[in-house]
Image (cartoon, grey):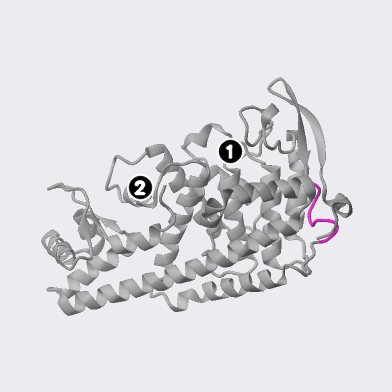
Amino acid sequence: MPETSELDGRLGKFVETSVAGERVRAFVPPPLPPEPPIDLSNLLTRLSAAERALGRLDGVSVLLPNKELFLYMYVRKEAVLSSQIEGTQSTLSDLLRFETEAVSGAPLDDTREVTNYVDAMMYGLDRMATLPISLRLIREMHGRLLHGGRGATQNPGEFRSSQNWIGGTRPGNAMFVPPPPNEVMNCLGDWERFLHSDAQDIPPLIKAGLLHVQFETIHPFLDGNGRLGRLLITLFLCAEGVLRQPLLYLSLYLKTHRSDYYRLLQEVRERGAWEAWLEFFLDGAAETANQAFETANRIASLLAKDRERIVAEADRTGSVLQVHDLMRTRPFLTATTAAAQSGLAMPTVNAALAQLQLLGLVEEVTGRKRGRVFAYRAYLEILSEGAAL
């Protein structure tokens, strides 16, 4: 990495502004790409490892009997983890039970925030078929992210027109003060131009890492910046064709290494230390892709092994297999839902659930006589790794 004095072109400017009666120095980043350019020579080994891991993950659909199933669950796990980074007290089990309306005791505000994240993510992925990643798409996704939750009063879908800050109890002792409102649209315009630039000398993974930090530094919304900024990494890699399916989500890595993550973001702002951030980012991409690949393998193996047991040991194999198939997308299931989704009669469903219990594949989790909820425990344990509070 070049000496600090050689990195002056990477340093932004501080602008004095007044917030809540205090004079503070807000930071305005320089446009991307960094100047002097990123020194790729020391990043090539990490970049190659990350690209290999992503390529292997992208081919995971060959292994999975139902890649939509894995995507469905993986998106929900990411939503939980990304929301936990922001302090939300909701687990994957909370979300899945809430979605099946199997339980009313989940923390409603927290669970709604996570379901909004799922909605924003899926909306963005679908919308990219007709609208490229852009400030317009980001605003549309933000509107969904904050709809009806605790962020509903924070101008969903609108870039901020007031000053925000990060860390600290007030602007004066904040860890970081993003650009003042009158600079936000200029910064976003530069960000969008770089997003769409044909920077052939910058590999897509490196570009994703640059875009993420710049978005977090601009902090263009009053709330939801972190969640949206993490989601944009995956959207960008899908848009660039690096991934065919949105299967790379860094929130578990960033949650595990939270202090390093925030420190490195700040070092980019204060010292132009892009290379150190990119080392961390590429390591995270490789580790995350490898974990996702292993998880997909373990899920495929579990589902196949359990199907074999059902065929070998269950009575009424057909109906039991049908209910087992349902639990691949509904690891929490009620008999009522199973009957409605499968078309099987209620006595047949109850008999199938009893068989799955007898085989030790599912367990009843409420202890109630009526409105019972059945959990596919081994499957949930694989999915929930790292997502506990």
Q: Is residue 9 above or below residue 22?
A: below
Query: Is residue 63 visible from the viewing direction of this image?
Result: yes
Does the magenta segment cover residue 211? Answer: no
Q: Which amino acid does the dot numbered 2 rest on?
A: Asp
Viewed as shown, does residue 376 lie left or right of 254?
A: left
In the rendering, at what x and y percent does residue 19 appear? 71, 25
Relative side of 182 to 301, left or right: right
Specify whether 312 is left or right of 219: left
Please tell me which residue is depicted at 42% across the width and 61% down the height of the picture.
Answer: 72
Measuring 39% from the left and 57% from the top, which residue is drawn there? Answer: 384
Give the extent of the magenta segment.
30-37
What amino acid is at disc 1? Asp
Q: Quadrant of residue 356?
A: bottom left
Q: Which numbered disc, 1 or 2, marks the residue that appears first in the sequence? A: 2
Q: Residues within 10 Å of mark 1 (few under 14, many from 20)?
A: many
**How many residues crowd mark 2 within 10 Å: few (<14), some (14–19), many (20+)?**
many
Whether residue 30 sits left or right of residue 53 in the image: it is right
Residue at numbered disc 2: 94
- Quickly name the residue at label 1: 223
Q: Quadrant of residue 25?
A: top right
Element at label 1: loop
Q: Position of residue 286 (x, y in %)?
A: 58, 67
> Which structural element holds mark 2?
helix
Kindly report the distance in space between the C-alpha atoms of the residues bearing marks 1 and 2: 23 Å
Residue 191 pos. (x, y %): 74, 51
Instruction: Give the residue furthest to the top.
Output: 21
Q: Main secondary structure of the magenta part?
A: loop
Q: Find residue 53 and report its horizontal and vertical position in percent.
A: 57, 72
Residue at x 54%, y 76% (from the top left corner): 56
Q: Is residue 33 magenta?
A: yes
